[in-house]
Each structure stands twice: as C-alpha cells, then as structure tokens.
Image (tube, helix red, strand yellow):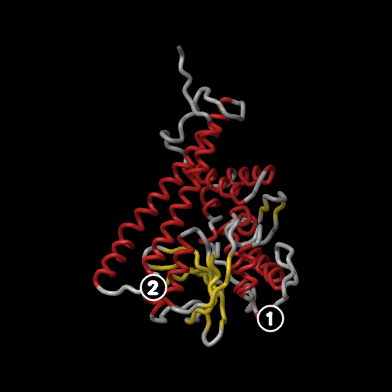
Amino acid sequence: MTQLLGMDTTAGLATGDTLARGAEELLALAGRLESSLHAFDWTGPDAERVRDGWSATERPALDAAARFVAALAAALREEARSQDEVSGDGGAGSGAAAPSALTTPQDPAAQQVRALTDRAQRRGLQGEALQRYHDRLAAMTPEQVAALDPTRFHGTQPDQTTCGSASLVMSRMINDPAYAMKVLDGYDPATGQTTGGDAQSRFGAEALAMHHQTNGWHSRDGELNPAWPEGWGTHPHDAAREMSAAGGSGVPGTTYGWHLVGDRGSSYDQIAQAVRAGHTVPVYVGDWAPRHVVLATASDAGSITFYEPGGGQSVTVTREQWLADRESLGGWHEPWFVVTPDR
C-alpha cells in the first residue's frame, strides 16, 4: 500500500488561524497578569523581587512563546497554501506535499509579504483588493517593504490643531497594513489607484481628513456625533469613537473608551497593558489643561514608546520618568486622558 504524504490543507489553515488567535490571547493574558501584579498596594523587598522577576524573566518568556506560536501559525498557513498550489486544486487534500515551510528555510522577503498579506486579510481586505495588495508587495524590494512600517515613518501633524488626528492616522496605519500602503507608498489596494506626492504630504492630507471626520456631525459608523470645533483639536470622546469604529483606527471588534488619568502609576500600567495586548493608545497631555495628543505604540518591561506628531519622532518614557513627572511628550509633562480598550 502506498502512503501519500502531505497535509489536509483545510485543517492546516484552520489550525494556523487557531494558533494565530492563541498567540494574540497569550499576549493579552500576559498583559492582564502584568496589570494585576501592579494593580494593588504592595511594597517592600518581596514586592520588588516578584515584580522585577516578572519583568526580567516571566514576561519575556510569555512574549517569546507568543512569538513562537505566531511564527508556527504563519508556517502552517504557508505550508497549506504551497501544497494547494502544487496540487493545483486550490482546496483541501493530502496529495503530494509541497516543500515544507516548517522544515525548509524560506526567503525572508517572501515571509514578510505573506505575513503582511495575512494581516491585511484579518483586517478585512478581501478579493481583488487583497490580491492587488499582495502583488504590490511582491513587486517591492525588501527596503521598500520595510518602509511600509508606520513606526519607522516620521510623519508630522499638518497644523497646530491636528495632533490628535495625526495620532489617529498613525494608529490606523499600524492596525491596517493596506491603509499604511496607501499613505506611505501612495498605492491604494482597495481601488488600485495611486496618489502622487511624498509620504508626508499624503499623511498630512489624511490627518486633515481625519480631523473633519472626527469633528463632524456623524462618526465613521454613521452615528450622530455632537460636532466639536476643529480649532479646539480632537475631543477624547471622538478619538474613542474613531478607535472603535469599523474601518477606524483601532483593533477591529474592540470598543474603546476615554478615561481621566488619576494615579500616575495606574495610568502607566493601563497604557502598557493595552499596548502589549496589541493596541495603540492615544494619550492626552498638557499642563493645567490638555494641550497635545501622542500615541503609545510599543512597550517592553521597562518603558513605553510614544509617537509624538509635533516632531514626528518616537519618544521612550520609563515608568520612573512617568511617576516622577520627568517625561516630555512634545514639551508637555502632565497626562490627562487615555483612550484604551473597554472590551
């Protein structure tokens, strides 16, 4: 009896999806555990030992496990798709196996294209638009693909009232790779059209359009919205609605709320937890009143990285700096509001 080698590709793709969700759940769990460790009063050597051990060992181990599971998910999907291409039937089966993505080193550029395409698909890009996105990526050099990473882009707000709008555009680019391509490359996969100019001019135009959207009479979801004067910037309520909207600036399926900063330590931990769970967090800062909006984009065991739209730069703030009022975000030191996931 001859045994056919290969994969049930339908089951393989489903397992890849399950593993990808598991990786996201691991990150979310790690964030919840970290928040719990800092959410109650506990001081002294034992508290320092436990929390330092968590930051130095346990949290990095959970993050590494999540990265491993995410990589395994991508490899399973690649294996299943490659086998379908070889078998030529575009469906499930266990015919002759394609070269295994699990055992054969893959071209890093091809892996990056696949990973970005998967992210765009999870964001909701489908059909011809998804194919256009994939084809555009595949035609790029590795340097051009790397330039699509929004966190490497130093975009600045187009005027004095659009710091919130610029932060929301940056958030949407981070959460929607096809939108990032539209802004940074000029090619819109949804329409197949190209917009001229440079990335900064396109970013500025998107920030102005975002300002009109958030401050208008209707939200992105079409709900009635009490218009906020554009000269006053972006109200945190409107930022939360934009983050929550379908096709908006947040993670799909997430409802965001805006919250007044009380205790500095709790607010820092709240931001760090949300970022480590895969979210971006608009943060309103100022002096005796809110003056500026920045965006938390990354966090490790000891710091949070913010996008600061006034200078188009990344600013790293440690917990100690935040607690001691020594952070400087666009020249402002006092945190007022944060926009974080409610559910």
Query: How far from the left and from the top, in percent, is residue 220?
Result: 70, 63
Res. 137 in view: yes
Query: How far from the left and from the top, in percent, is residue 200?
Result: 62, 65
**Residue nearest the observer in this picture, 103 or 155:** 103
Residue occupying image coordinates x 54% and y 51%: 145
Instruction: In the rendered view, tell whether residue 9 sits above or below residue 25.
Output: above
* Secondary-structure class at tag 2: helix
Q: Residues within 10 Å of mark 1 (few under 14, many from 20)?
A: few
Residue that extends furthest to the top in the rendered view of this protein: 1
Q: In 3D space, how far apart are the residues under numbered discs 1 and 2 (Cα atoms)?
A: 33 Å
Q: Amino acid at mark 2?
A: Arg
**Residue nearest the observer in this picture, 253 or 61:** 253
- In this picture, residue 307 sits left or right of residue 217: left
Q: Amino acid at mark 1?
A: Gly
Indicate the quadrant containing the C terminus: top left, top right, bottom left or bottom right. bottom right
Residue that extends furthest to the bottom in the rendered view of this protein: 288
**Residue nearest the observer in this picture, 234 or 240:** 240
Task: Tell me which label, 1 or 2, sits earlier in the chain.
Answer: 1
Instruction: In the rendered view, tell whether residue 256 sits above or below residue 235.
Output: above
Numbered label attached to residue 245 = none
Residue occupying image coordinates x 47% and y 23%: 5
Find residue 289 and report its image quarter.
Answer: bottom right
Q: Residues within 10 Å of mark 2 (few under 14, many from 20)?
A: some
Labels 1, 2: front one: 2
Residue occupying image coordinates x 59% and y 62%: 255
Residue occupying image coordinates x 47% and y 29%: 99
**Mark 2 lies on residue:** 319
Query: How far from the left and from the top, in percent, is residue 48?
Result: 28, 69
Query: How far from the left and from the top, in percent, is residue 115?
Result: 52, 46
Numbered label attached to residue 231 = 1
Res. 311 in view: no
* Secondary-structure class at tag 1: helix
